[in-house]
Image (spheres, grey):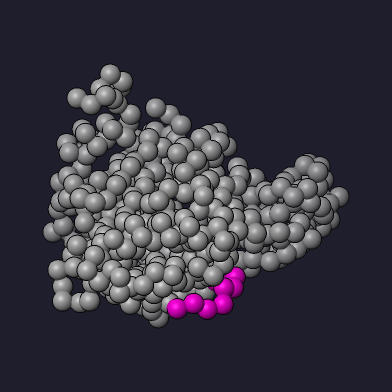
Amino acid sequence: MNQASDRPQSYAETFVNEIFPSRYKTGALAGERYTSADFYRREWEAVWTKVWLVTARTVEIPEAGDFVVEEIGPESILVVRQEDGSIKAFYNVCQHRGNRLVHPAEGSMPSFTCDYHSWVWGIDGSLLSAQDEEDFSQGNPCGRVALEELRCDTFAGFVFVNMDPDCIPLKDYLGPVWDRWQVYPTEKMVRVQALTVKLPSNWKALHDNFSEVYHFATVHAPFLDYLEDDFRSLACEIFDQGHTVMHMKGALPSNRYLTTDAPPISEQLAGELRRWDLDPADFADRPTETRRALQVQKRKLGPARGHDHYAAMSDSQLTDSHHYTVFPNFSAGMLADGMLFHRLRPHATDPNVSYYDVFYYATGDDAFSGMSTAKGGSGGTVEDAPREYLEYGERSLGALLDGDVGTMATQQKGLRSRGYRGGELADQEYRLAFYHHMIDRCMAGWRPGQD
Ligand code: FES
Ligand SMILES: [Fe+2]
């Protein structure tokens, strides 16, 4: 036994050592988890209404009255900047007769007027005026009725909300993620790309995909020149709170790629080496040393090039993909100078449809380096990109993301088959199994913060 043998196992360790092999290797992921309206309804109540959910960035609502509306399953959430600089979140519903209050996805208003009977709501949720207020024999609703507020907090420049009034604080919910992300300058990053895609699949299908890289060699083959997908070289962690992280070596050709006839240093990798004043020709005979050489060079040249945050980063964080999943619907590829934000949101009623938000944030001129979503992207003007709303297959999302979403429609069809036996998982897919296990725990009555 190792040195940890004299302490009790964490829940995550118990999962890896006992629960995963005994309960999740074979047959645990029945298709109904992805297709059944009854499962969707129970999952909504047990999971979605009890967890912290990421919404907009704080920089999107800088002034009092600035707002964003986030649609999450059957709910619409109104997030508003207050006069004192704080942020509040409300259910986007008028308390007179239940009309949806705010229709645009974003904007700025001094107050919100319902378009049914013109009740006027302040940005703090108070009712400012009601038509014919003397006609309410139970008492003037102004001063008595307010918008229904949700718990709201911020982290890493993002606003999180929670529908459970008795939820644990966001910091406790995030656990190790809160500490690990302190090295990333997420609040200074700009939005380079923002796409929302309507998917013909359950929200969990794509989040499953982001919880494993077993699919990498098949659907991301063009990226094997830059990322090592071999499961023996991956370092994964799962946390008691339900979150996970996977460290995937980058800035070097994978062992799989090196068995092909292609030049050992691809154009993608050569470009990254040149940007850091390294000569790709020097690595032709030792291609797997590019990662280490880039780490050294980034340490040396980074500060003078404005990358002050490198000082707090590990060598791995300078070159590798550190991919986090934050329970239940958020994942983020954390890179030295960028963040690939993925969020899945359920459709209001249909378990066979979901919405995928993929936003790419980056610091300064490194927006298009290494692992950007547009493979081979060669620089450009960094701007706060407007959000685009797309139908599935409407256009390419970039080589990397096309691979990830490409099978969603056909997998959903397969998951509906009575012939599907509920999965047969590889050991390396245990992050995915942990995610489903946490959903199962919630549906059995567990709440975040409980042992
Ligand atoms: S429902 Fe909003 S004012 Fe009547
Ligand atoms: Fe992928």
Which image quadrant: the C terminus?
top left
Which image quadrant: the N terminus?
top left
User: Up-down: is 450 above or below 26?
Assistant: above
Q: Position of residue 264 (x, y in %)?
A: 23, 72
User: Up-down: is 358 above or below 123?
Assistant: below
| Magenta extent | 378-387
Q: Position of residue 345 (x, y in %)?
A: 45, 58
- Kindly give the residue lying farthest to the bottom in the view shown: 395
Is 396 covered by the magenta stretch? no
Q: Nearer the viewer, residue 134 or 16?
A: 16
| Residue 126 visible in the displayed image | yes
Q: Main secondary structure of the magenta part?
A: loop
Q: Quadrant of residue 78?
A: bottom right
Q: Nearer the viewer, residue 260 or 104?
A: 260
Q: Residue at x 38, y 35 (%)?
A: 240
Q: Residue at x 43, y 60 (%)?
A: 297
Q: Position of residue 99 (x, y in %)?
A: 64, 59
Q: Quadrant of residue 225?
A: bottom left
Q: Residue at x 15, y 73 (%)?
A: 260
Q: Nearer the viewer, residue 244 or 135?
A: 244
Is 379 covered by the magenta stretch? yes
